Amino acid sequence: MSKSFGRNYKAVKAGNPFDSGGRGRRWRDRLGTGVFAIFTYFILACVFLIIGKITLTGAPVLFQSEAPFLNTEFFSKSPMTLHEFEDGEGNNCRLDHDRFVDFKKNNPNAVIKNEQTHSNAGGGILGPLVGTVLLVVLCMAIALFIGISTAIYLVEYAKEGRITNTLRLAIMNLAGVPSIVFGLFGFAFFCLSPIFPVFTAVPDWEKSLLAIPLWPSDGYLSFQGWGSSLLAGGATLAVMVLPIIVAACEESLKAVPEGFREASLALGATKWQCIRTAVLPYAAPGMLTASVLGITRVAGETAPIMFTAAVVTKGKLPWENSEGSGLYWLSSVLTQKVEALPYHIYSISKLQSNEALDEMRYGSVLVFLFLVIGFAMISVVLRSRYRKKLKW
Amino acid sequence: MTNSTSTGHNADDSIISIEDLSFSYDIGKTNTLRNISLKIPEGRVTSFIGPSGCGKSTLLRCLNRMNDLVETSRITGGRIEILGQDINAPDVDVIELRKHVGMLFQKYNPFPKSIYENVAYGLRVQGVRRMDILDQAVEESLRKAALWLEVKDRLDASALELSGGQQQRLCIARTIAVKPRIILMDEPCSALDPIATARIEELISELQDDFTIVIVTHNMQQAARVSDQTAFFYLGELVEYADTTTIFGNPKAKQTEDYISGRFG
C-alpha cells in the first residue's frame, strides 16, 4: 500500500541548499515592487504639486507681511480692469480701475505714458466668492428639502418592492450623468421652461405662460422660467447632488433604531408624529454631515453653472443690483446671474497671460481650494463629533 | 380566579377575547398562529409562555396591531375583540387602540431625550400642552413606576444615563402616562440582571390594581411568580390555558408538563 515519494525529492546541492542559482528572478521581483511604488508616489507628487504650487504662489497674493496680514482688498473688491502705465518720472505704476479714475481726476495734469489695460487683472474676488457661497447655500437648501423628503418616503412609507428598487436605481443613475449634461438640462428645465414662476413688476410677456396680477401690489407672479440665474444654478447643482444626499439620508434614517419607532407608535403617535419626533431628530446630524460632504463635491463644479447661472463679469453684488421690496426684492436677487469662483477661474485662465493676471489666478484658485477643503473638513469634524455624541 | 378552564373564563370579566385567530407574517406561507382562542380577564396578570418561535410574542403584537408594521403580515382567520370591539375592523383607528393598549418592549428603548420628556412623550403626541398637567402626569407615572425617588432631582438628565433596570422602569412610566387599560409586556426582563428583574416583577404586581397586564416571558419561574393566568403555546398553537397554579401544579396536557418540567424548550 505505502508508496515512496523519496525518489522525487530534488537533489540537494552542496554548500547553500537554498541558493536559486540565478539573480534574475530576484531582480524581476524588485523591479515589480519598484514599479508599483513609483506609480503610488506619482499620485503623491500630483497632490504636492497641486496644493504646494498653488499655496506657494497664491499665498503672497492673499497675505501680506504687515497687519492685518490679509490682503483685504482681494476679498473686498470685485474683479476689475487693471491699468498699467509709466508716470512722468518713468516709474511703472499699476492701478485698479477705480483708483485709476480717482488718480486722473485728482491729478488732471499727470503724465501717463505707455498705458496698457489688462481686463480682470485688478480688484479682488468678492463677486465670485459671494456668488459661489450663495449658489452653495441655495443648492443645499433645495437639495436637503427634496433629498430628505425622498429619503423619508423611501425608508418610512414606500413598501419595499419593485417600485422602490426602480426608484433607487433611477436616483443612483442620476449620479452617473456627466456634469455638462446637468448643465444643459438645468438650462432647458429651470431657465427656459415656463413652469417656474418669478415675482416681478414687469413680466417678460414673450416668455411668460401666465402672469397673475398680485393685487394690491402692482406686480405679477409670472410663469416665465427662472432664466440664467442664482435660483436656476442652485437648483441644477441640487439635482446633481441629490443622489448623494438621498443615499446619505436613507442611511441615516435606517440607522435610527427600530425600537424608537415602535415605542413611539405604541404610545399612540401617528406615523408622521413618530417620524417627526422619534426618527428625524436622531437622523438629522447624520443627514447634515453627509450632505455637507456631498455639497463639497458640487460646489467646485463649473459645467452645471456655465449655462444656468454664471456670468464673466458683473459690477455689482446681487443685492446691490436688486429692485422692489419684500418678495419682489427676493425674486429679483435670486433671478439674476452671478459671478462664481470656478467659472471666474475658468474665464481668467483663458485670457492672455500677464504678471498681474497670474497673481489673480493663483489667488483665486487658492481661495477656491481653501473653500472646498474647508467644507470637507467641516463635514468630517461634524461627523466625528456626532458619532461620539449619539449612542443608543 | 374562579372556574377557569382551558377554553376561557366568564365572558363578563374578560377584556380581551381572541376567537379562532390565525395569523401569517407572509400571506401564502404557513400560519405563525393557528386557531387560537382565549379570553383574558380584566385587572389580572396573564402570562404567555412557550419555547422560542411558538408565537407568543406574535400574538402579543396582534393585540395592539404592532404587526401592522410588517407589510406582508395578515390575520388569516378569526378575530380579536378588546372591550367588545373587533380591533381589526375597518373603522378602528389604530392610534386610538394603542392609546388603550400600551406596550413594553424586550429591549428597553427610552428615547435619547430627558427623563421628563420620555414620560411626557405620549401625552405630547396626543396634543397636551399645559405644563401643569404634564408635570403632574410625569410625577404620578414615575411614582407608579417606582422611579420617582431615584430621578426626581434630575428629570432633565438624559434617559440614557440611567441603568438598564431604571431605563425599563422609565419605559413603564412612559407607558402608564397615557393611562392605557391594558399593558402588553414583551419579555420585559430578558435584558436585565436578577436584581433589576425582581424590581420589575414587584412593580408588575403593584400595577395590576390599575391595569390589565399581558406578559410574554421565557422564564417559567417568572410566569409562576407574577401571573394569575398562564397560557402555554407550542408551534403556533395554544396548548393549554388555565390558572397559573393549575398550569404549574397540575397541567392537563403532556406537552405543558414536559415544558414546565424542563424536558424541552
Image (cartoon, coloured by chain):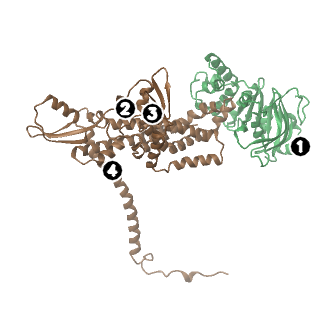
Chain colours: A brown, B green
Q: Which mark is residue A50?
A: 4
* Image marks 3 and 4: residues in contact by CB distance under 8 Å: no
Pick the front one: A162 or B30? A162
* Disc number lying in front (3 or 4): 3
Q: Which mark is residue B253?
A: 1
* Image marks 3 and 1: residues in contact by CB distance under 8 Å: no
Mark 2: secondary structure: helix
Marks 1 & 2 on one chain = no
Chain of the residue under the numbered disc 2 shown in the image: A
- The part of the image, by quadrant, that contains residue A16 is bottom left
Find the distance from the CA under tag 1 to the CA under tag 4: 81 Å
Q: Which residue is mark 3?
A: A205
Find the distance from the CA under tag 3 to the CA under tag 1: 87 Å
Count neighbours of disc 4 (C-alpha within 10 A) and say few if under 14, some if 14 to 19, many if 20 or more. few
Instruction: Give, as a three-letter code, the residue at label 1.
Output: Ala
Find the distance from the CA under tag 3 to the CA under tag 2: 24 Å
x, y (%) of residue B205?
Answer: 77, 27
Residue A180 visible in image:
yes
Instruction: Give, as a three-letter code, the residue at label 2.
Output: Pro
Mark 4: secondary structure: helix
Q: Specify the quadrant that holds the N terminus of chain B.
A: top right
* Image marks 1 and 2: residues in contact by CB distance under 8 Å: no
